[in-house]
Image: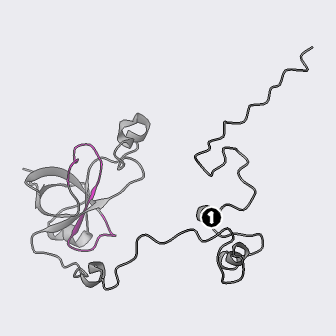
């Protein structure tokens, strides 16, 4: 009684304006030469598979060459990236280079909006090298004032053994310390407990 009813999903309509196939199976034939995304043939690596797509070894692609290259590199150009190498880091007297620190939880801009992630995020802190902390007479969990770009932040200190002298680390993205462009120079001062 219901044998004439089909439950198969119909084929999507063909688009005459595109060379691509709208199917989950894809195209099993050889694509037109301008649309070849990569050269691959079973049992061949990519350099050898190129021969399978050519009319003869070292010749044109089957189906014609894909076209001409529209953008050519400059013939006499130099890249400033390779000529302007920055000088190595040198510590400054009375100033620290404030660098970003990243944590799995909390340093991505939206993650602290989720209560489950926010409870795993660290509280804002400042990481210092042990030698810098000793010079400032700072111990672990002591607080200090960090002045950066005209704003002053009061932060607890954690020892960061991975930081060289002259660097201070600040976790990014945590509430209360948003908007600081890192890396930047800062000054640190000890908070006297009286």
For image coordinates 78% across by 73% down, the residue present is 43
Give the camera-side residue of 112 and 93. 112
Q: Quadrant of the N terminus?
A: top right
Residue 166 colored magenta? yes
* Point 58% across, 46% down: residue: 17
The residue under label 1 is 36
Q: Which residues are magenta?
A: 160-180
Whether residue 118 appears in magenta in the rendering, the answer is no
Please state which of residues 80 and 110 is positioned toward the viewer in this rendering.
Answer: 80
Name the spot of residue 119 as percent of width and height, x first: 39, 39
Residue 119 appears in the figure: no
Which quadrant holds residue 7? Answer: top right
Please state the horizontal and vertical placement of residue 185, each as a whole percent of the image: 15, 65
Tell me the residue at 26%/49% (across/down).
124
Left or right: 179, with 35 as reference point: left
Q: Is residue 182 above or below residue 162?
A: above
Q: Is 43 left, or right, of 87 in this rendering?
A: right
């Amino acid at each position: 009684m219901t044998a004439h009813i089909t439950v198969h999903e119909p084929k999507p309509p063909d688009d005459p304006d595109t060379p691509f196939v709208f199917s989950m199976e894809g195209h099993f034939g050889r694509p037109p030469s301008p649309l070849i995304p990569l050269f691959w043939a079973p049992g061949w690596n990519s350099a050898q598979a190129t021969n399978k797509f050519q009319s003869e070894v070292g010749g044109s692609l089957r189906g014609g060459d894909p076209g001409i290259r529209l953008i050519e590199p400059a013939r006499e150009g130099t890249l400033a990236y390779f000529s302007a190498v920055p000088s190595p880091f040198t510590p400054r007297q009375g100033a620290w280079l404030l660098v970003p620190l990243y944590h799995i939880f909390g340093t991505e801009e939206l993650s602290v909006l989720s209560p489950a992630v926010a409870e795993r995020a660290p509280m804002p802190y400042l990481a210092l090298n042990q030698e810098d902390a000793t010079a400032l007479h700072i111990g672990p969990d002591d607080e200090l004032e960090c002045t950066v770009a005209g704003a002053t932040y009061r932060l607890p200190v954690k020892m960061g053994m991975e930081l060289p002298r002259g660097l201070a680390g600040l976790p990014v993205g945590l509430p209360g310390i948003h908007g600081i462009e890192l890396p930047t120079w800062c000054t640190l001062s000890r908070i006297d407990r009286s």
